[in-house]
Image: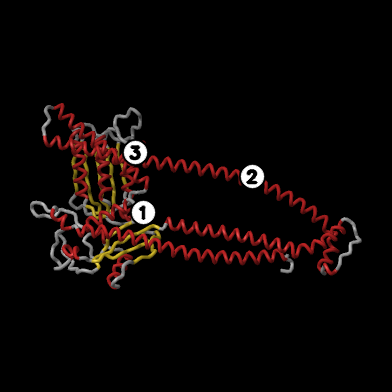
Amino acid sequence: MGNITLKTKFVVLISALVVVSLFANLAWTSVNKRAQMENELREKGEVLAQQMDAVWEFMASNQDRLEQISYTEDGVYQGLHCAIVGRSIGLLFTSQSEYTTRFVNFDPRNDADEPDEFEAEALAAFTEQEGRTEYYEIAEYQGEEVFRYLAPMTIEENCLDCHGEPKGEIDVTGFPKEGWTIGDVGGAISIIMPLDVYRESEQSAIVQDVIFFGGMLAFCLVIVYVALGYLVTRPLNKIQAGVEQIKTGDLDVELAYTESSREMNTLTADFNRMAEELSTMYGNLETQVEDRTAQLAHANDVLERQRAQLEEVNGLLRDENQYKSEFLAMMSHELRTPLTSIIAFAEMLNKESEPKDEKEAETRREIEANSRALLFMINDILEMSRLDAGRIEMNVETVDLGDVAGLVQSVVQPLAKQNGIEFTCEIDADVPLIEADFEKVRHVLENLAGNAVKFTPRGGSVRLHISHHPECREVWLRVADTGIGIAKKDQQRVFERFVQADSSASRKYSGTGLGLALAKEYTEMHHGSISLESAIGEGSVFTVRMPVGHDAESEREAMCR
């Protein structure tokens, strides 16, 4: 320590104090920011819960008006009620935002409203602690840290018609009443909010603090340096002047002891031998430092220009991609509405009147068939734009593949009949219910069956077969056709976006080239797989393999393969 200069000691001491203060401030800021973030999220969750509760209360208070027009001639209730509307609005809000909104209860009428562990704790708290109006916490959800907020839904007078006494009596919606009374907790509104934006704000505040205290540290170091120079270095400069005279050969220098010390006297005696070597070394070092500093400055300038150019290019690419996705989504949506009307009017015309002659009948068939084909393409473009924008989420539920196949058959059968193609659908008796997204599975089969019809010549056949393979814990959905087939070299390419086996400008078959790409992406979202067997002129067989439940893909592969 005795060899360290006073300047160095003071600079190190002040630096240590400032660094300690900086870390203490950062810790304090982080705690405050997290508390502020949690309070803001709680307030936002409270507002969202109040809005959802207001919708629920509005539907409940007007239920008697809806019930007046919600019965069929046979007295069957087919109208809306508050639970359906509330859940539908929650799902719509979830699909159009980053938030997740659910209505949960211990014994729900709908399996989708079953509470998870956190929601179960909140429901228990609302039941046990009378008057509690909210339950929230920053917790982990699906592998990510999120803010979870729950607000109780208490039973009011207009809820008793469907949920009141006597317990077990069947209400207008076909469910047994729960026997609740006014004031009971009938469930909770569950809201899940991501923390990305708030984390960015917290990190920004921390960075600002680092910059501020870093600046303060630099300022304090400069002040200490100047003070030491004036109070310590300045007296030593007088000794240095005498030493400089000795170095030049002036041996008559006599320094006053009142201005010096024993160490300075020793330095005076030895400096004459060291001065020349030190001066030479210092000069060389100064030159090297200047050269290296200039080189580093030039390199930094080049890197900064390249970084700015890269940011500009990235910004242009992001803008162009956003414009593309927005344009495709807007055009697909705007085109689908009038096209749906055309199909509806064509079907209505066929039902209400017979064609005057074969030419008119052919014209009607062409209108309907081409309209449905165009609707397929528009739906594919809209779905792909949603995928690119990250707005598609899995809505897993219990799915009956027989229902899916029925819907697909009702859509594809008219197209097959129009083209003179035999379309058959077979479902094995042992095919179980599966856990999947109903709409996405339907979309996969519609695309595969629609493609098979499009690429099969008149007089051919298309067969949809659904089978169960318990050894794999999978169901297999096969679409086989007697169409033109796909060459071996193109069989992997057809699953890419905007790709068809014949991509030339004069190709015979129209289409966007998105159907198989969407089918592949939706299948993989279910942890399934899609494969193709085909040969030119011999038709094609597409096989979709989907898990029955939530088994891991590796477990199914080990059992089946």
Residue at 21%, 32% in the rendered image: 367
Residue at 42%, 40% in the rendered image: 320
In this rendering, the label closer to the viewer, 2 or 1: 1
Q: CA distance from mark 2 to mark 1?
A: 45 Å
- Residue 494 lies in what quarter of the image? top left
Q: Is any atom of residue 403 visible in this view?
A: yes
Q: Which mark is residue 11?
A: none
- Residue 548 lies in what quarter of the image? bottom left
Q: Earlier in the sequence, mark 2 or mark 1?
A: 1
Which residue is under mark 2?
298
Q: CA distance from mark 3 to mark 1?
A: 33 Å
Mark 3 residue element? helix
In this rendering, the label closer to the viewer, 3 or 2: 2
What amino acid type is highlighted by mark number 3?
A: Val
Q: Are marks 3 and 1 in contact (CB under 8 Å)?
A: no
The spot of residue 63 in percent (x, y) is: 18, 58
The spot of residue 508 in percent (x, y) is: 29, 29
For residue 363, above or below residue 313: above
- Residue 185 lies in what quarter of the image? bottom left
Q: Which mark is residue 98?
A: 1
Q: Which mark is residue 494?
A: 3
Q: Is 233 situated left or right of 124 in this image? A: right
Mark 2 residue element? helix
Quadrant of image for the N terminus: bottom right
The spot of residue 210 in percent (x, y) is: 55, 59
Residue located farthest toward the right when viewing the structure as drawn: 252
Q: Is 266 situated left or right of 110 in this image? A: right
